[in-house]
Amino acid sequence: MKTSFLFLATGFEEIEALTVVDVLRRAGMDIKTVAIGDDLKVTGAHGIAVTADVLLADARVNADAEWLILPGGMPGSVNLSECGPLSEMLVRHHRNGGRIAAICAAPAVVLAPLGVLDGREATCYPGFEDKCEKAVMRDDCPVVAFDTLITANGPASALKFALAIVACSMGEHTAGDVGSGMLYYPAGENFYF
C-alpha cells in the first residue's frame, strides 16, 4: 500500500490535521505525519502539541506517495508555504500527476502560489479566494474533490475532507463504511463532489 504524508508546521489547525490522520487510519490507509522543522514536536494554532512520525529531512517521500496533505491554520499555512523543500516536493508531485489535498488557508496560501490550482476548481477558507486568481473558486460547497486534487474550506469540513480522500483512494463504499462507523451521515447523503 502506498503511503500518504500530512505535513505539520507550527500553527497548524489541529482539527484539520488530526481528523485526517484518524480517518485515513480507520480506513486502513498508511499515513505518516511529517514535521517540517527540526523537532518532531509541533504545536498547533490552539496550543495543542503533536509528535510527528518523522521529520521532513528524514521522510521518504517519493513519486509513489499516495497523497501529500496540507492542513490549514494560521500561521501554519504560512509556515508551510515558506518551507522550500516542501514547495519543491509539492510542485514535483503535482507535475507527475500525484495527488494533493489541502484544507482551510492551505489551498490559497500554499498551493495557489505554486500553480497547483491553476485552471482547477477549488475551495478555501473564506477571505482567501483573492490569492487564487488562476483557480475557479467554489464557495457553494465545503469540499471540492477530484482524483488528484481535493480542497476544503475549514475546520467544520475536516471530516468530509478526510472521507473524500478515502473515497478517492479506496472507493465510496469504504468511505461510507468509515463514515457510518463514526455515525457521520444518514443513508444516502452524498458528501463527495
Image (cartoon, rainbow, N blue to C red):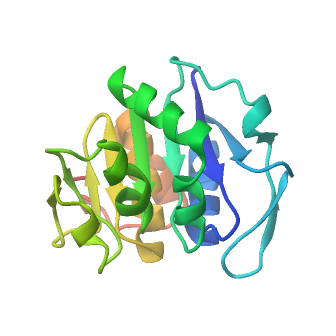
Task: Indicate the quadrant where residue 17 lies.
Answer: bottom right
Could you tell me residue 32's position as x and y percent? 69, 39
Front-most of 33 and 96?
96
Task: Indicate the quadrant where residue 107 lies.
Answer: bottom left
Whether residue 29 is visible, yes or no, is no
Front-most of 78 and 142?
78
Could you tell me residue 148's position as x and y percent? 32, 34
Residue sitting at 42 percent across and 68 percent down? 105
Q: Is residue 117 left or right of residue 101?
A: left
Give above or below for 73 relative to 65.
below
Quarter occupied by the N terminus: top right
Q: Is residue 157 left or right of residue 56?
A: left
Q: Is residue 161 left or right of residue 58?
A: left
Task: Indicate the quadrant where residue 166 lies.
Answer: top left
Residue sitting at 46 percent across and 48 percent down? 177
Please tell me how many numbered marks the rendered image carries. Answer: 0
Residue sitting at 44 percent across and 26 percent down? 92
Could you tell me residue 106's position as x and y percent? 44, 60
Whether residue 92 is visible, yes or no, is yes
Give above or below for 47 relative to 181.
below
Front-most of 119 and 150?
119
Q: Is residue 1 left or right of residue 95?
A: right
Give above or below for 154 relative to 177.
below
